Image (cartoon, rainbow, N blue to C red):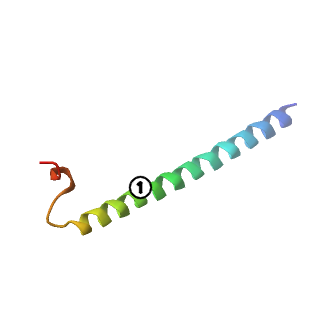
Amino acid sequence: MDKDLMNEDEVFLDQMKDQFVTFYIASVLGMELIKLMHRQMKSKRPDKPAHTDKI
């Protein structure tokens, strides 16, 4: 019975680890994408910062 419990816990931990790794990779890729888009927006209008458009 102890062995079964340990195996279930190990499977659960493996699933949690996979979910965490997937989430981490998605977060890093999302941040890089946001930075890239922000850089492209700035390079289109180097004379004006984005937050002063409506002034």
Residue 54 rendering spot, x and y as whole percentages: 16, 48
Identify the residue position indicated by label 1 in the image: 31
Q: Secondary structure at mark 1?
A: helix
With 20 as the anchor, is 38 left or right in this view?
A: left
With 16 as the anchor, is 55 left or right in this view?
A: left
Q: Is the residue 51 above or below the residue 35 in the image?
A: above
Which residue lies at the image location 19% right of the left edge and 50% below the top edge? 51
Disc 1 residue type (three-letter): Met
- The count of marks equals 1
With 8 as the anchor, is 15 left or right in this view?
A: left
With 48 as the anchor, is 8 left or right in this view?
A: right
Crowd rating for badge 1 (residues with CA inside 10 Å; few <14, some 14–19, many 20+): few
In the image, 15 versus 43, the foreground residue is 43
Query: Residue 40 is drawn in which quadrant?
Result: bottom left
Q: Is the residue 48 above or below the residue 24 in the image?
A: below
Taking the view exactly as shown, the residue that stands out farthest to the left is: 55
Taking the view exactly as shown, the residue that stands out farthest to the right is: 1
Taking the view exactly as shown, the residue that stands out farthest to the front is: 54
Which residue lies at the image location 37% right of the left edge and 64% below the top edge? 36
In the image, 9 versus 27, the foreground residue is 27
Query: Residue 1 is drawn in which quadrant?
Result: top right
Residue 34 rendering spot, x and y as whole percentages: 38, 57
Which residue lies at the image location 25% right of the left edge and 64% below the top edge? 42
